[in-house]
Amino acid sequence: MRLSPVDALVAAGLGRPDVPPTPQALLAWRLAALSRAVRHAAAAPFYRERLGNLPPGFPHFIEEFETLPFTLASDLTEAHARFLAVSQDDVARMVTLSTSGTTGAPKRVAFTTEDIEDIRHFFHIGIQTLVEPGDTVLILMPGLRPDSIGDLLCQILPRLGARGALGDPTGDPAVLAADLRRLRPQTLVAAPSQIRRAIDDPDVRAAAKDCLRTILLSAEALPDGWKALLAERFGATVFDHYGATEMGYGGGVECEAFHGYHLRETEIYFEVVHMITGDPLPEGEVGEVVFTTLTRRGMPFVRYRTGDAAAMLPGPCPCGSKLRRLGPILGRIIHGPDGPQLTNPAKGTANRP
């Protein structure tokens, strides 16, 4: 079993690329990183009002950082321009995300050229577990727009001696079967919804078993039992990726041990907090995932509540990494007038936590 390649990204971020990263090294590094992140975020009007009067050197300890208010998705939909920490001229890409179907106000997330290069670098590192030199990767994620997810994957795959091919993002089973036969890819990258119809299609299953070695799923929580079913139907090893556009697409990715998502610890700081009180939770307890960007330039986020329910898993990982991981996403947290409810993506049911 290979060590997660994300450890190399973390080691480089700590400034010691030749030394395996440890939880102790991250703790010693993290306060200074959070201090830099908070100071940079205060350049944005939204955070200037919240963070502009913090004492020098804040935070002096992690519990002090945990007193900062949360950022909500509704804050972003109401005033996305106020989150910009750079000038409009420095924005290289703006992504618009709809919320609540077509009726909710959209979220807009900005990236600078440097932010996009950080995404490329994480994609390059994270996909090394799945892809080998000479591979073809069939990508169903949208990729026609410059620096969209599919386009970024196509950009970085040659760094690994592989190539990307954009497929049909609608997931039409007939088109997918034809692409699998024509391109004979070793890896498929898709959101679960893009291959939901194809999982029962006999032509797709036969074509997939004839060429696929690995599958990377992303963008959506996996329904219960779906990974094992897909692996059996397509005859491939299935990996899951966790991320969100607000994070800079990538947050973490599974290794060959399939024991949680290995996280971009030196680029994003993750917390798990109580769904009701917002208090930090110890490792192993399920709560809401919260993140703070540590290196984002264009649109930084401080203690952004994702609405995702998961637990943080302690290290070490069976792959050999000593670092913590994020456990599987168990559902979406909906904050309503009667308090938070957890919606199970597999069953579509809501339960009071």
Image (tube, rainbow, N blue to C red):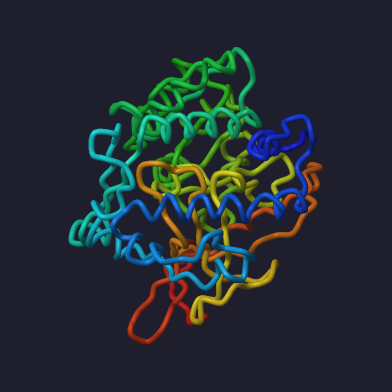
Residue 314 placement (x, y as % from top left): 74, 59
Give the residue at x 69% y 33%.
8
258 shown above or below 145? below
In the figure, is residue 96 to the left or right of 311?
Answer: left
Image quadrant occupied by the N terminus = top right
Which one is nearer the viewer's eye here, 304 or 236? 304
Give the residue at x 44% y 43%.
296
Give the residue at x 61% y 25%.
131
Which one is nearer the viewer's eye here, 208 or 80? 80
How many labels were placed on the picture? 0
Residue 204 placement (x, y as % from top left): 47, 31
Residue found at the far front of this picture: 56
Residue 214 placement (x, y as % from top left): 61, 31
Residue found at the far left of this picture: 103
116 shown above or below 337? above
Give residue 172's quadrant in the image. top left
Which one is nearer the viewer's eye here, 55 or 158? 55
Residue 185 placement (x, y as % from top left): 52, 21
216 shown above or below 145? below
Give the residue at x 66% y 31%.
129
Residue found at the far bottom of this picture: 338
Give residue 150's quadrant in the image. top left
